[in-house]
Amino acid sequence: MRPVGNTLRRSSAPPDVRVINNFPGRYPTEDWQVAYWFVAEDGRLAHNRVTLQLPAGYARVCPPIAPGQDGCVYHVRRWGVACRTSLLERINFDPSVLVSLQPGRPDEAADQELLRAMFLVTWFDLPGYFIIASDEHPLLLFDPEDYLKGSYTRWRTYLGALAFLVSGGKVNADFIRLCHEFPSSYGEAVEILLDILHGEETVKCLPVWSAD
């Protein structure tokens, strides 16, 4: 099984994948659509939309929301999106079909494997070098009937991803406050970092901003 945590790890999803299911064919599913933005290695901003296969019945326990409300999205990270695992209990999802519960196996080890399986049912790596989610570039999640059931705007802004890339991971900040309160400075900072990534400036020119 692949890792499900590590906030800033890279996604393991192939760049051309269109349908994502961590346990294909193991349980009945329904097709959800996730629309999101990501930043490529060269700083390019790109939009993508893929299908997530969640367990059948998940939409029934997720009410529609307004943009900006989390809904059934737990969080967004560099690697992708985590939907709320807690909702699986409400649809009576049985994770034991996903693991091998061997006789005599320690209860603690079995519980850990079950928990990990539950996360993998609802947490998805998405195609993209650095997934972002902010007010200007929100992640949106739609159920099979195309109702908005999840969104997220409190992860990294475009500037936050660029700063991480330019600094080699040393700058880890969202810059949400800068985007909201000083949009012109935010835009200037984006242009400076893009110039650095494209070799038109040097890292010595990298300004110091509030890391929120």
Image (tube, rainbow, N blue to C red):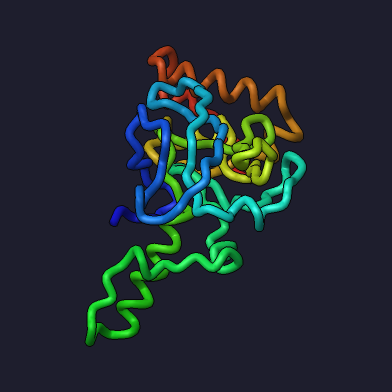
Q: Is residue 128 visible?
A: no
Residue 85 relative to residue 23: left or right: right
Q: Which residue is depicted at the point 35% across and 50% down?
A: 25
Where's residue 5, x and y in %?
Answer: 41, 56
Which quadrant holds the C terminus?
A: top right
Q: Is residue 79 visible?
A: yes
Work out whether residue 91 or residue 40 is closer to the camera in this orientation and state it: 91
Instruction: Answer above or below: position of 62 versus 96.
Output: above
Outermost residue, top direction? 200
Q: Quarter of the image holding residue 1?
A: bottom left
Outermost residue, front direction? 28
Where's residue 63, x and y in %?
Answer: 72, 52
Q: Which residue is depicted at the point 45% across and 68% down?
A: 94
Instruction: Answer above or below: position of 106 versus 17.
Output: below
Q: Which residue is depicted at the point 44% across and 56% down?
A: 121
Label count reads: 0
Residue 204 relative to residue 109: left or right: right
Work out whether residue 144 or residue 4 is closer to the camera in this orientation and state it: 144
Work out whether residue 1 or residue 20 is closer to the camera in this orientation and state it: 20
Instruction: Answer above or below: position of 195 versus 76.
Output: above
Where's residue 145, x and y in %?
Answer: 65, 38
Where's residue 60, x and y in %?
Answer: 65, 54
